[in-house]
Amino acid sequence: MNLGTGLAVPGYFIWTLFLLTNCEEQRIPEEKLVVVTVATTETDGFRRFLRSAKHFNYTVKVLGRGEKWRGGDYMSTPGGGQKVRLLKEALDQMETEDTIILFIDSYDVVLASGPKELLRKFHQAGHKVVFSSESLIWPDRHLEDKHPHVREGNRFLGAGGFMGYLPNIKDMVSDWTGEDHDSDQLYFTKIYINPEKRKSINITVDSKCRLFQNLHGALDEVVLKFEEGRVRARNVLYDTLPVVIHGNGPTKLQVNYLGNYIPNSWTFETGCTVCHEDLQPLTTLKESEYPLVMVGIFIQQPTPFVSVFFERLLKLKYPKNRLQLFIYNQEVHHEDQVRTFLQDHGHLYQDVKSIGSEDDMDAVSSRNLALDMCRKDKNCDYFFNLDIEVVLKNEDTLKILIEQNLPVVAPMITRPGRLWSNFWGALSADGFYARSEDYVDIVQGRRVGVWNVPYVSSVYLIKADLLRSELSDYQLFQSNTLDADMAFCHNIRNKAIFMYVTNLHTFGRILSTENYQTNHLHNDLWQIFENPADWQDRYIHENYTRIMKDKLIETPCPDVYWFPVFTDVACNHIVQEMEHFGQWSGGNNKDSRIQGGYENVPTIDIHMNQVNYEKEWHKFLLDYIAPITEKMYPGYYTKTYFHRWFLVPTTAQNHQTTSATEGL
């Protein structure tokens, strides 16, 4: 053995000894690792697990496919014995002793790193079998004192994830004789707290979450860590980067949130990397081959711009003979608008079902009925929920949602100028709204992708196959304690079905219905404050924004400027509103409507304050007239102060009106 090297230097002789040690850690070949999991049915969570395993090139063996699950319900009672039975049977077929088994759940698990890191950390643990750890003991709290203490970290065993050498794990499960509904957690716990068995099998727990991260009892410890081109979950309490992330117990929504990013679903460098996977393109289909969609339209309260809603529905870029309409309207105020739409355009659609206020059906029952009609129609491929307050500006919305090929997917829509949207990023402990860390970034478009979320509303697409299988319960919207939309999402979550919201495109917005009054002829005219964007779309001329750029201002006579501002609809609505009011002045000098009661220049008119339109008219002048005035008169500024505003008929015969303003 060469122990050293001699080196002669004038005046000195140096002898250097080298202790020959292997400085590199002993590496376990990755091909020795086999990931084993149980999945009796292929759920959304299972597919997510497989996607993360494929990303890191894990070898996965799935047990129990096609079997009926008899292992109980983890959320309420202990169970999971079926997993131990299936594992024991599978291990009997394996003989290579240096095989390393990673046995983990799959429905609520995401892999955050590859086999190389996992095996390195397993080797560093210095034991033949390593279990995940928990800070909470379950299911038998009386066994707490029997758990061995650890120097730092969690001391309780978690059965949702463990890894070890094949002979040791075989030894560990060899005594299993329990029923499928018995507790796997209790079985492994009793082995672990038995000093002799713990020593003979050589078991430890991953107390500092270097390999496994169970989220139950540790939500405050786990944050996202964005690395270059990938995302990890970091345990800030122990400063570790676990490889296996497990949403055990009541933490399914938290692992769903983490799964939006881990391992590389979304990063700051790449954006969304999985948004274009498993798409269902429609471009290869003839229009006659498009999926048949039932569109459920629900009118439950007085809502502005209903006529515009139906105009946009007509513009939806989807073959109308592949659409069926279900319209529920419980508002008498909107009956004429619904009737007019169906009379003029109902024949364009494959089928129409309309339920009005006279049918005496409540909103929850109408939604259940609509889903059931699609469920029972074997030709129905999708149900598209579209509440009346939804403003769909994107005419390709339905095509985009279908092509995403997801079980339940909603286009993100928001209320302009606010953080209000049609999805929730998280839920509170009692099942209501909570703001997720990424909610604001998603709503404001700083993070763009397709997001797994716990709640969607107002507009969403559901695969009809789900309605005939997992969601076959008729009363999906029914609850004694929750609103209809919350009950619906609650039932979907309970079936482990993922709901998504996409902000890959701009889809539209949500109307505010809070202060909508129905005591006028054209009530939408009063929406300039509540829904300014929709008011502008409806009433401001399409060329208004081009006035200065394209020099659209005409001067018919000195100091008089003529430019487009109102649409034809606006003009008609204002005229009809005044005619409907009908209380024109007599055109005399005596006028009790004004201070002093005397009009110097009398006209036949109606003052804006007579129809309660004074504030709205002032807002219109401030937003649309004042900017043009200031550009035409540089250096001058107006706050649109006024004495009074009024409308006068241009001819006595037909009372067509023009507006005038004193004191602008």
Image: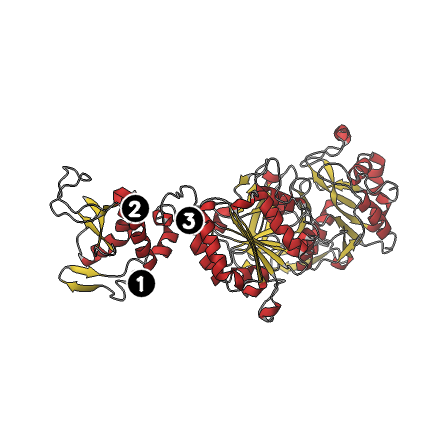
| Residue 312 seen in this snapshot | yes
Question: Few, some or many C-alpha atoms within 10 Å of disc 3 (few <14, some 14-19, many ≥20)?
Answer: many
Question: Mark on residue 543?
Answer: 1
Up the image or down, 554 lies above or below 243; here it is below
Quadrant (top left, top right, bottom left, bottom right) of the N terminus: bottom right
Residue 22 at x, y percent in the picture: 72, 54
* SS for dot 1: loop
Which badge, 2 or 3, comes first in the chain's sequence? 3
> Tag 1: residue type?
Asn
Q: Amino acid at mark 3?
A: Pro
> Pointers 1 and 3 in contact (CB under 8 A)?
no
Where residue 604 appears, as percent x and y from the top left, is 19, 49
Q: Which residue is mark 3?
A: 304
Residue 542, quarter of picture: bottom left
Q: How far separated are the C-alphas under marks 2 and 3? A: 20 Å
In the picture provided, is 192 more to the left or to the right than 489?
Answer: right
